Amino acid sequence: MQDDQTAMLDWRDGVIPVSTRFDDPYFSLNGGLEETRHVFLAGNDLPARLRPGFHVAELGFGTGLNMLALALAAKDTGPVRFTSFEAYPMTAADIARALDHFPEARAIADPFLAAWSRGDRRFTLGPLDVKVLIGDARGLLPTWQGTADAWFLDGFSPAKNPELWSPDLMAQVADHTAPQGTAATYTAAGFVRRSLADAGFTVERRAGFAGKRHMTVARMMP
């Protein structure tokens, strides 16, 4: 029997995990690692802004691909903190299967997969000090004591998973963002951009990845 908190998956073409709970793939069909670099790294002006102690937070851990991309980008930076919120964690075996699609990321993933298999949700991955908080971000974020310099907003599609893009949750993201901190997401949905703006971010649309016209970047106003 599958745990209610465990991700429920189908596999597209045998390599792309698709959440049956949200009917949405975990990464771009056109190149997930490249999309991560375009949206979440470049969208937050990373790695240029990275420094020892820099803190990245994320909504939607998924396969850990964004974390691995950040670890690759931060390899010459020194210790960087990474905190992610995930309601429905994948098993280590499913994560490994998904990451096999990305040899560059998979090449550094063994310490993460070993920790995940042990049930560890706090571990070190190269330059990253990682903590993954399991549960609904709507309940976890209000009590979180952290402050992020950059956010990866990577929940499932707002049309499929609107709870992770609600105005209240975007306000919590803002409350846990450092001055001049940033956020980036693949979606350019109007209600998401409005929620970020209402929460105190300056919001900008940029060119999206591959065939997607737009994405969203945001910076906390002073």
Image (spheres, rainbow, N blue to C red):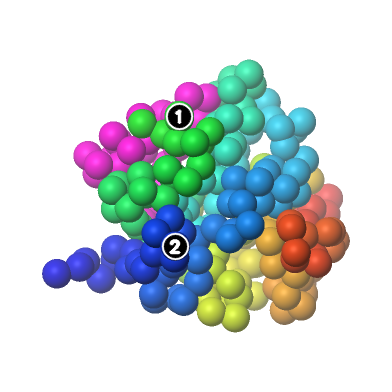
- The amino acid beneath tag 1 is Ile
Query: Callout 2: few (<14), some (14-19), or many (20+) C-alpha neighbours within 10 Å?
Result: few
SS at mark 1 in the image? loop
Outermost residue to the left: 1
Question: Residue 160, percent across and down?
Answer: 54, 79
The residue at 39%/74% (across/down) is 20
Q: Nearer the viewer, mark 2 or mark 1?
A: 2
SS at mark 2 in the image? loop
In the picture provided, is 186 more to the left or to the right than 82? right
Residue on which the image places disc 2: 13
In the picture provided, is 141 more to the left or to the right than 147? left
In the picture provided, is 120 more to the left or to the right than 83? left
In the picture provided, is 27 more to the left or to the right than 49? left
Q: Name the residue nearer the viewer: 51 or 14.
A: 14
Question: Residue 126, percent across and down?
Answer: 48, 24
Please report the bounds of the magenta region as a residue range. 111-137
Q: Name the residue nearer the viewer: 1 or 166.
A: 1
Q: Is residue 124 magenta?
A: yes
The residue at 49%/36% (across/down) is 103
Question: Residue 65, percent across and down?
Answer: 51, 46
The residue at 66%/46% (across/down) is 34
Up the image or down, 105 lies above or below 24; here it is above
Quarter assignment of residue 47: top right
Callout 2 touching callout 1 (CB < 8 Å): no
Return the mark for residue 108.
1
